Image (tube, grey):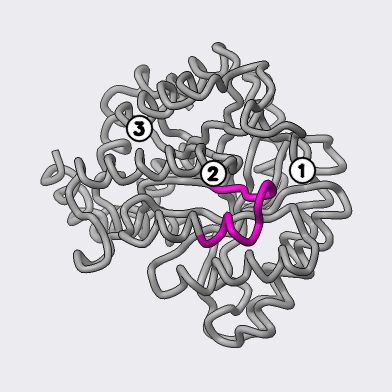
Amino acid sequence: MRLFGQLIVSLMPITPRFFIRWVAKRYVAGSDIGSAIRLMKKMSEEGACFTVDVLGEEISAMDEADFFIEEYSNLIDSIVENELDANISIKPTALGLLIDPESGLDNIEKLLRKAAEHDMYVRLDMEDHRVTQPTIDVCLAMHEKGFRNIGVVLQGRLFRTLSDIAEICAVTGNHTDFRICKGIYLEPENIAYCSYKDIVNATNDAIDEMLDSGAYTAIASHDNPVISHALAALRRRDMGPSKPDPRHITEPSRSVGKGPGYEFQFLLGVRGDIRRKLSEQGHRTRIYIPYGTKWYEYSMRRLRENPEVALHVAKALLMPWSNRR
């Protein structure tokens, strides 16, 4: 199956751009804020909530960060105005973290402060291993400044993830909030697990560690072995829909829109059938909504970095009835 995914990826550079756009529209809300707002209004009927991401990442000059600051500021206003159950996800490199760490930190704080005024949560997306520690450092620095509406994504495939969980929890305590995923980046084998089985096992271990630490745990996976493990792990800890979080005597103060200590997350357009089933069972489910003019770059990057994504594309094309948005 992986070879099939690699074959699809190898054909993408010669595939007409209009066809890529046709495929991408399943996984990208559109090119502007209005497109994202309309889609979220429609999908709210399914009981889902959302994390919104403005497409685009590592910038080459600090003035490029101005676009993201303005766009995210307008996005926050639009979410509030339309009373949507949504928060935002930002990439630190899009705000200049690798070019000028101090200015990048200021840019992130500016958006975080505005989101906090509306009790809106901000997720620091995790990029490749070059920025793993800098991203964690940003989260910890913001917590030290008193912000509680921020958390990071950790990638199960990295060897360091379990120690990262312990490090973050030691600083942020009951306010710790993680998003755990397998990880889209194909990292070197000296720092990351490379086989599917090892990555799944490592991700499951991270879920257990997060739950046992008392952290809010957002489980972001489309893989049946991970979802099944997470459901069993929740049952063992007496956690579930409509139940108070048994890990805390007093419920930690969190941003609006959170579940009882956990939630499940899915990319737009992927495994909608599983997401709806979990939602019907009462679990809080969140959809990752990307939008922006960089839809082509986003689509190609995800395919290049992880050919397994191409399998979802192929399934959507060949069996659309089995994978409705």
Query: Is any atom of residue 268 visible in this view?
Result: no
Instruction: Tell me the amino acid under the disc marked 2.
Output: Ser
**Helix, strand, or loop for circle 3?**
helix
In this rendered view, identify the residue nearer to me: 232 or 131.
Answer: 232
Magenta span contains residue 125: no
235 versus 50 height, above or below: above
Looking at the image, tell me whether mark 3 or mark 1 is earlier in sequence order.
3
Residue at x-position 58% and y-position 33%? 262
> Horizontal placement of 273 versus 121: left or right?
left
In this rendered view, identify the residue nearer to me: 133 or 182.
Answer: 133
**Helix, strand, or loop for circle 1?**
loop
- Magenta: predominant secondary structure element? helix
Furthest-top residue in view?
A: 281
**Helix, strand, or loop for circle 2?**
helix
Q: Which residue is mark 1?
A: 255
Whole-percent x, y for residue 144 in the image: 73, 68
Magenta span contains residue 175: yes
Residue at x-position 34% and y-position 30%? 316
Q: Residues within 10 Å of mark 2 (few under 14, many from 20)?
A: some
Instruction: Tell me the amino acid under the disc marked 3.
Output: Val
Work out how far the residue at label 2 is from the one at label 1, CA to CA, in angstroms. Answer: 19 Å
316 versus 116 height, above or below: above
Q: Which mark is residue 226?
A: 3
Instruction: Tell me the amino acid under the disc marked 1.
Output: Ser
Q: Which residue is mark 2?
A: 213
| Magenta highlight range | 167-178
9 versus 1 height, above or below: below
Q: Which mark is residue 239?
A: none
Looking at the image, tell me whether mark 2 or mark 1 is earlier in sequence order.
2
Query: Is any atom of residue 274 visible in this view?
Result: yes
Residue at x-position 75% and y-position 34%? 251
